[in-house]
Amino acid sequence: MGGIATREAYGKALVELGQINEKIVVLDADLSKSTKTSDFAKAFPDRFFNIGIAEQNLMGVAAGLAAVGKIPFASTFAVFAAGRAFEIIRNSICYPKLNVKIAATHAGLTVGEDGASHQAIEDLALMRALPNMRVFVPADAAQTRAIVKKAADIEGPVYIRLGRSGVPEVFGDDYEFEPGKGKVLKDGKDVTLVAIGIMTAKALEAAKILETEGIAARVIDMASLKPIDRELLVESAKLTQAVVTAEEHSVIGGLGGAVAEVLSEEYPVPVVKVGVQDVFGESGTPDKLLEKYGLTVKEIITAAKKAISLSRRLQT
Amino acid sequence: MQDEILNLKLIANTLRQHVIRMVGEANSGHPGGSLSAADILTVLFFKEMRIDPANPQWQDRDRFVLSKGHASPILYAALAERGFFPKEWLLGFRKINSPLQGHPDMKKVPGVEMSTGSLGQGFSTAVGMALGLKLDRSPARVYALLGDGEIQEGIIWEAAMAAAHYKLNNLTAILDYNGLQIDGPVQEVMNPEPIADKWRSFGFKVITIDGHNISEIINAIDTARQYLEGPSIIIARTIKGKGVSFMENRAEWHGTAPKPEQVEKALAELLEGREKLWEE
């Protein structure tokens, strides 16, 4: 898939943060080589805590560290972070609004060969439903760096979703992240493609192909899944009258759900969701998995045409 | 010393009265496990812990985490008596718009160090606090009160392993071993024994005491403080519902509120007990 994985960028950003902020501490649950927190562990051994294979305690300890003034980044795979430790995140981090950053790696199908047990496709739905939680999903290395740094400045819980596999560059090094704001990457009047994570690059590619067919697509990266940019979504719906969402997550409760929630209340237009269709993944290479489960450029193009046709039907 | 112990016994008696009034007024709450922990909290809040009600966020303060968060009435009673908030708040317990939630909320009540209630989690956060304070070379200590039913939660043992691994000698756990949980005796529901051996094998210094004996509680906390190798746990044998005869050793008083006539009877007993303390 090319490019730097967001988890790699996370590891490097943590080290940069560690140099400028003494309060940053990092926790892991025996996956530091995979989550890349090992970079921080090497640079700041005193401020790195391996909690062992105990994800519930990972989150509880992070909450305690935050309660005495630290800014903990807790990392493990998304399936264990959001899934196994869910109720600790709910009751010990979000309810008391403690300053814990959860950086969950290996999210989505692109975990690859490890298979369904390790492919989190519901973490965004779980995290998004928690009061006080902010949910950010970077699309590439530069955006990851910006998000990780911003997360350290924000007071309160943050969930950052990272991937295992390399991703193409979307943003330049001058990119700045603003919570609650989406970014228009390409303008167009016929359909809006809203994407996050690895699907942002694919949405841009889809837009290029649509262009050759005479369809002008507006492409938005919505890395700030929560708080979501309601204003930009409504403005785009008004402009294009048709919306597609694309995410490496279940079509239930993630980006598609969030966009539909906003538009159904504020400016209803067709919203067609590209994502995992309420099924578990399986072992395979990331590319083969994305192909099989419909997370492709081709699928986005099909969805765009469907959204436009639904929209026309509504207007006649 | 004798005067001090008598004074602490009187305070514990006052806290027990608050518990009965609060749970009675709310018609909801957990009296049994609040009464069993009354003497422990009295020693912590009125003798051992370095805390300042006028400055609840004082950086070097000792921290108390009520991991068995359902015993919130005894924590609220101790905090109110210690001056963290007005005693009038107590009668709002569990009512709408009150800061005194059914289970402690650190964002609403001065002196509450962690929001707890989901069992096992408070202890895990206490380990995190101790770790952070140690990193800062803070003189502060962390105390966590656990229930005997609560130690059936897996996260307790995850946290225990981490506390020993990181040699958290600034952490003292206290187990309120009253022997009863909602469904009955802990040994019948899910036997936690041999408790002392378990904690010892997890790397804790274990101190076993009578959890209603003020002098023993004081000595145990001192012993724990002087132990520098790692974390300690005080296993305090207690009586659920202690101080109110019809509640003592009865699982049904885990989470049941006394009716008005039962409140009267309980308070009368506690007042009688108070008189006896003076006579001793």
Image (spheres, rainbow, N blue to C red):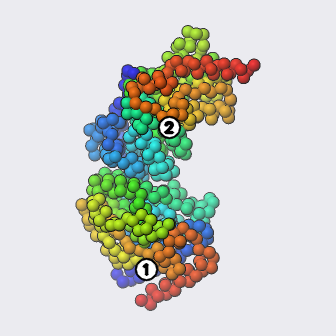
Q: Which residue is mark 1?
A: B9
Q: Residues within 10 Å of mark 2 (few under 14, many from 20)?
A: many
Residue B65 in view, yes or no: no
Question: Which one is nearer the viewer's eye here, B34 or A26?
Answer: B34
Q: Residues within 10 Å of mark 1 (few under 14, many from 20)?
A: many
Question: Which one is nearer the viewer's eye here, A27 or A279?
Answer: A279
- Please state which amino acid type lies under the numbered disc 1: Lys
Subunit of mark 1?
Answer: B
Q: Give the residue drawn at x 33%, y 67%.
A: B194
Total tally of numbered discs in the picture: 2
Q: Quadrant of the N terminus of chain B?
A: bottom left
Measured in 3D between alpha carbons, the distance from the residue under mark 1 to the one under mark 2, in whole angstroms, is 53 Å
Q: Quadrant of the C terminus of chain B?
A: bottom left
Question: Which one is nearer the viewer's eye here, A118 or B83?
Answer: A118
- Please state which amino acid type lies under the numbered disc 2: Glu
SS at mark 2 in the image: loop
The part of the image, by quadrant, that contains residue A142 is top left
Q: Give the residue drawn at x 56%, y 69%.
A: B256
Question: Which one is nearer the viewer's eye here, A187 or A113?
Answer: A113
Left or right of B93? Residue B151 is left
Q: Which residue is mark 2?
A: A122
Left or right of A158? Residue A34 is left
Across and down, in percent, residue B100 comes to 56, 62
Q: Residue furthest bottom?
A: B279
Placement of B219 over or under A282, stated as above or below: below
The part of the image, by quadrant, that contains residue B47 is bottom left
Look at the numbered discs 1 and 2 and tell me whether their residues touch, using CB distance below 8 Å. no
